[in-house]
Image (cartoon, coloured by chain):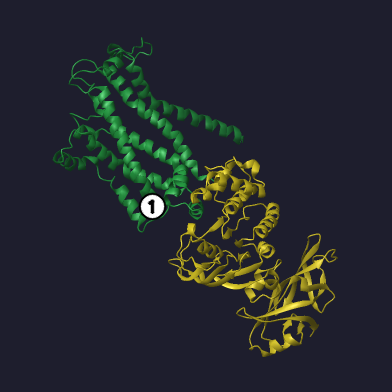
Amino acid sequence: MNTVGERRWVNAVFGLLAWLVGLVFFFPVLWMVLNSFKGEQDANTSPKLFFHPTMDRYRDVTKTTRGLLSFREAFANSAFVVIVSTVIVLVLAIPAAYALAIRPIPKWRDVLFFFISTKFLPVVASILPLWILAKDLHLLNTRTVLVILYTGMNLPLAVWMLRSFFQEIPHELIEAAEIDGAGLRGQLTSIILPMAAPGIAATALLCVIFAWNEFFFAVQLNPAKGSTVPIWVTTNISTRGNFLAKLSAASVLASLPVVLAGWIAQKRMIRGLAMGAIK
Amino acid sequence: MTSVRFEKATRRYAGTPKAAVDDLDLDIGDGELLVLVGPSGSGKSTALRMLAGLEPLDGGAIYIGDRDVSAVRPRDRDIAMVFQNYALYPQLTVAENMGFALKQQGVPRDERITRVREAARVLDLEPYLARKPKHLSGGQRQRVAMGRAIVRRPAVYLMDEPLSNLDAKLRVQTRTEVVELQARLGVTTVYVTHDQVEAMTMGHRVAVLKDGVLQQCDAPGTLYHQPSNLFVAGFIGSPAMNLVDVGDDRPTRIGDTTVVFDAAGAAALEGAAAGDVIVGFRPEALRVGDGPLRARIRTVEDLGSEVFVHLALEHRGANLPLVSKMAAPFAGRAGDDVGLQIAGTTHVFTADGSRIVTATSSLAPR
């Protein structure tokens, strides 16, 4: 039997299957992008592949109307919340990961489990106490509450990820730095952080994506002020008239930053994971 | 003047019954190259790491010069270490790697550059100063690791199997270079290896460790000719010493011959307590040809300059393998029946491994 030929045939089938699955996953996104360039009429009638593309829907959704949440405002809120929470996450997670990976503290396993256990609870179960807390602390409809929540939400993940990246650094390098006279700060700035940089970047980008996409907390705690981009997207749903094309345009705008971030994260992630190959 | 002293230094790992390094007493002279050698798990690397400050002491003390460094941080011990996998900082260039310690010490930039260049010249690394470690060959990386150590001008060099990642030919060449460099710099050096050839060829003295316990620390020649116990006798030398369990018969017999000792040897054996003894003799002391002890050749390994003859003989009802080192050319072939004679030093050990006597002996028909 011709095994080489057989293998080629099998590969071709798998390749075709992969493309098919890929297309199935990608189709809704493609549909959204196409719709965003159509008129409402075209978007709501039977599917057409050829149409007159227009940027009008983008103009519609980015138009600022007094009293309504504007794209500009939502984007600014999102950017603030995402950047500030990610910075805090990294500032807290890097020392924690160092303590867990490079100089394991006693009971480090329990600590790691505790971190991840905070993700076990369904988000819905915690929303009422969170809402009451936020209300009593006068944090409802502020960006601060989202910064706090997103920090708490991403911190366990960041500690876990950074810990595994830090573990990839050969221990001899840290010992060598220690003998060479580097203190903790020298070890961190000269050896550990530069070597773990791809991993730190990957972690940061993942935190950015998760915080950017978060909808549930934002819609419950910040419906009036301090609303983020996901909430702005939903404001384009109207009870009267067609809104599919408009909603598509809004969704495209909301997705763009994370798609970009995801694309970069993917490249970084691979570098980060290949970090072990040092010798 | 920097000497190093281990004083009852002990390291115990949690959850293990035996100490990894047990009551180690060792004096290393100023400018000496001392090799710690032993099989894996013998505690040689642990001892080195204790000296480096990377492992804490559970007992005893370590002195560098007159200073008790037992509780001193690695960076304050004035040592430099070469690691087995070199531990070069991958994101730094060769020059930055070599100058890293100086930078940490706050040495001015100009002096740093001068010292790095100087070390690079000594090690033939000048063309590679701007390269990253991943663009270097194994031998070059090894030299960078050495360079990183010598740039610092420390009181003591610590080397943890620095040649074991090189191929055989490069290893032999680098071995000589390290010895020359150490002699030139005159800095006290502690060198760890599992390779007894490396130990014997490099060390001014060699400390043999087994199970965390120092077995013997002597000049290579002394270790070879006067091993203090059975372990050292078997560990040092390649091919290994022939060790024959002769039981408690007196006079001692191998096969159907008697081992005849010189007067001193016979007296020592006479004076020793009765019990099983083990007779050891080096391959070069076993002559193949005319002799009273009959054996059969199993294989012949011709190395060109010398020949290892592996033999089998009947001894106390079992098949006993022996090896002889003969000058080339050697006429015998596998399967040949030959006669054996001992011409040289023989060591006698008690069953628990301590040496009774080293004496001249020969074999006589029963």
Seen in the image, is A30 located left or right of residue B145? left
- Estimate the x, y position of residue B286 in percent, counting from the top left: 78, 73
Looking at the rendered structure, the secondary structure element under dot 1 is helix
Chain A, hue in figure: green
Give the residue displayed 64% in from the left and 62% down from the top.
B195
Seen in the image, is B291 located left or right of residue A14? right
Amino acid type at image mark 1? Leu
- Estimate the x, y position of residue B141 in percent, counting from the top left: 61, 48
Q: Is residue A5 visible?
A: yes
Residue B136 drawn above or below residue B146: above
Pick the front one: A51 or B229: B229
> Which residue, given by chain and number where applicable, does mark 1 sit on?
A100
Residue B163 drawn above or below residue B222: above
Give the residue displayed 49% in from the left and 49% down from the top.
B106
Which chain comes out yellow in the rendered image? B
- Estimate the x, y position of residue A225 in percent, counting from the top left: 19, 29
Give the chain letter at badge 1: A
Give the residue displayed 65% in from the left and 41% down from the top.
B127
- Estimate the x, y position of residue A239 in percent, counting from the top left: 18, 19
